[in-house]
Amino acid sequence: MHVLSLRLLPFLAALLLAACASAPRAPEAVVRGELDQREYRYLELPNRLRVVLISDPTTDKSAASLRVQAGSGDDPADRQGLAHFLEHMLFLGTAKYPDSAEYQDFINAHGGSHNAYTSVDHTHYFFDIEPESLEPALDRFAQFFVAPLFTPEYVQREANAVDSEYRMGLKDDARREYDVLRELVQPGHPLGKLAVGNLQTLRPTEGDIRGDLLAFHQRHYSANLMTLVVLGKQPLDTLEAMVRPRFDPIEDRDSTALAKVPELFAPSQLPLELRIRPEKETRELSMLFPVPSSRARPSAKPLDYIGNLLGHEGPGGLLSVLKARGLAEGLGAGAGFDLFGQDAFQITVQLTEKGLAERDFVVALVFRAIGQLREGGVEDWRYREQSALGELGFRFREKGSASASVIGIANALADYPVAEVLRGPYLYADYDAALIRDYLARMQPANLLLTVTDRGVETDRQSRWFGTPYAMRSLDAALLSDAARHAPPLVLPAQNVFLPDRVATKSLSAGAPVSPTALADEAGYRLWHLQDGEFPGPKASLYLQMLSARATATPRDAALASLFALLVQDDLNEFAYPATLAGLQYGISPSSRGLSVKLSGYDQRMGLLLEKILHSLQRSEFPAERFTSLKTELMRELGNSTRERPYSQLVDRLGNTLVQRSYSDAELRAALADATPADLAAFAADLRSDASVEVLAHGNLLAEEARALGDSVRDALRGGSGAEAPAVEVLALPAGTSVRDVQIEHPDSSLLMYLQGASSDVAERARVALAGQILGPSFFNELRTERQLGYVVFAQPYPFARVPGLLLGAQSPVAGPAALAKEFRAYLDRQVKALDVMSDDAFARQRDALAARLREKPKSLGEKTERLWSDLGLGSYGFDDREQVALAVDALSRPEWTAYFRARLAAEDAASLLVLSTGEAHRGKDGNLPSGRVVDPAGRWKSDAKYYRFEWPRPVQDPGRALHSGTP
Ligand SMILES: [Zn+2]
């Protein structure tokens, strides 16, 4: 297909889309952005598998993704979760590669990663890998779809992993709310099924479940329902030659994807109010309107247009008015459901307590906004502005990681013609005012599902699979309409002043530095600059940090730092929101050394936004009601962390235990409770009087531009006290086992075993990183696949600053922490033996895979900025920290490393910390907790504890000099 102006020919475009599905076509050219040097080829194999090949000679990762148009919507009623279960099973052996761990071992040993997910209408598998190993990886991958084994032994075992996955989500509010929707949809709608599945719905021991898996695979895993995307460094012809023989054997069974399903709700069901009691402290109001899918007009984007205007956070808009009246703290609007020809537009409002009490007014105001849009908000110039923003976004789109590219394109193939798989999501080229108004007309009271989520709502029933308490009642559409007429009018967004009109890459002189140089280095101020030739384009990053010991001196200071960051963002929001729409992002957050501000995007208007941010950062006083509102919000968020999944709470607790002046959410919450506006004002003033300032200007910025931006930061934020910037301190664990017991309300137990390295020097960091590389897959395979201890099972390197550590973790519905600790110990003992017989070749493969991972290039300007920023934080002024570790990895030898592993990490008296929680299911039944030195509940250590200290390094004239202590 030729690239047409779809604006003129929407009808024709729709026809062509329909035609895409059947007739064989000549290769089509994929429309690319300006910075995109990759080559693309589309082809359809004889079995009708649709394929996009991408050749990128510069890539250091290859990737592939295969998407099947079949998902949980296709589950048989008596085996709900089968599609998801099948997704798990495909990883566990094929006729050609029967070993259940082979695929994962292969991917890991060649520097890659893999995953999959099951959705209602499709299932998606993907991996990435070092470029040299693409072909053998594809050979393994293709077999999933040609000849999976479904080994009976693993069928029975893996059903437990699926059940664990279901159990892990039991306290997740998103899943709990979805469970209520499941009970509400019309009978026969695919959303009514338990997509994740559990032992009750899968019934693995009843009937012939393996036969059912095979039957599902045969019926739905047909080449005509699949798309494949492969990215490699090889030329397109070579990639095509790799793909054809491996994927053509997938059978074309001429299957049909599920298409006709009942409407989501029966017309008589709406309008309806649903009240849901969540686990977390949340107060949310959602207004959902079922609407037809707009997929047939992919570049018209009527729902995006509406979402952009309703969700606009500028002055006088919906959120602005709700905030000014103290009713809401946040708002989102958009569609994102798009299944089987149906879609749903949803507006969600994060309510304050007052907003909850006055929610009828909130609903009325939203309807008023929708009415106003319908009457006067559908305008050509607004559409053109969105179109211009989209076009700009596409022109300078960065290519992104290999895996994100293949996943994105495989999904885009379902929504856009081949030529538009890259541009489609950005393209607004089919303005149709009548279509937009038609959608707006459907967002009316009679078509409303209103959901109020709050801990205090009265409920009268519980959902079946997640036990969510809820209630419902029908609403009166006429009353709702009447209320909307009486709501105050809103202001539609003004023209966006941040839309850049000059977008050019500035020329870079030959021989310009390739890593940041210090343009300024004076007392309390340092400016780093790199104009980057590696990522051309009109974008830049400006990162700055106010370093001050005051920011984290006590839990109260740390809590006030968070609150200050929230107040500053809030102060900026109405002004800066259009900037975020125009591709200029910013964020302000507390850090371990102070407060950091990150700006990134088109550089042209960066100075304008920076000026405003600096102005807000100089404030000490904020409106009293904003202080109260945001403090309440922060208290609520800090309280909610006790509802996170157990293992992730334990990971947070690990950090609080090991890093000085890092506080748990409970400590922060307690410290914040009685803070007043005067406390905050005093804190902000202290912070500024203490602050040293570090700035990194990176990307499309000339040295003089960087200097101007940096100097304005210095003038606004540098304090005069001359105080030393704070050091980061990491606890050096004593030999032997320390234990920290954490109380968490959850049925599952969880255990982390943290094995700390012996020093923070680069060789030790390399040794521990290699342990993570080698152990990761076998730990997963032995504890999850073989022992079925839980869905979340992982082993990975987990450093704090430069201090290395190996983290083993699991969350389990079947074993308590004592049982898990025994399993972890037994695993380490088995590893010691296994490593003794590891071949030199196998060792070299793992070592090289790790070194390649470390040497992976950043995939975007933003990713590179993050790395440079991290190097700055570590005082690594050669900006080569990863390379230093990679060099140390290159130097590792098998005998030395295995001896190290035995004597240090796997030793009985290794310096280790167990962080654990006993699940409700295992209390009183798990046996004795592992013995060890008990860390008190606040995680405080005796004063004789030793710490690694990382100073904020100065001076900087000696690049590459590592200013930190190698041993505590
Ligand atoms: Zn799963």
Image: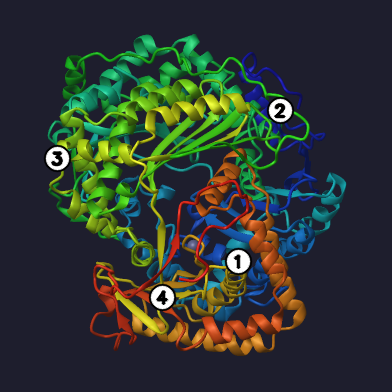
User: Real-space Cα distance between discs 2 and 3?
Assistant: 52 Å
Whichever of labels 4 and 1 marks the residue nearer the N terminus, that label is 4
| Secondary structure found at label 3 | loop
Q: Where is residue 10 in the image (x, y as percent from the top left)?
A: 61, 19
Whichever of labels 2 and 3 marks the residue nearer the N terminus, that label is 2
- Can residue 279 be seen in this snapshot? no
Whichever of labels 2 and 1 marks the residue nearer the N terminus, that label is 2
Residue at mark 1: 762
Residue at mark 3: 676
| Secondary structure found at label 2 | loop
Q: How crowded is mark 3: few (under 14 residues within 10 Å), some or many (20 or more)?
A: some
Which mark lies nearer to you, 2 or 1? Answer: 1
What mark, if any, has residue 733 been given in the picture? 4
User: Real-space Cα distance between discs 2 and 1?
Assistant: 40 Å
Q: What residue type is labelled 1?
A: Val
Which mark lies nearer to you, 2 or 4? Answer: 4
Instruction: Please say if 836 is above or below 314.
Output: below
Ligand 1 within 8 angstroms of badge 4 C-beta: no
Residue at mark 2: 34
Q: Position of residue 265 (x, y in %)?
A: 34, 39
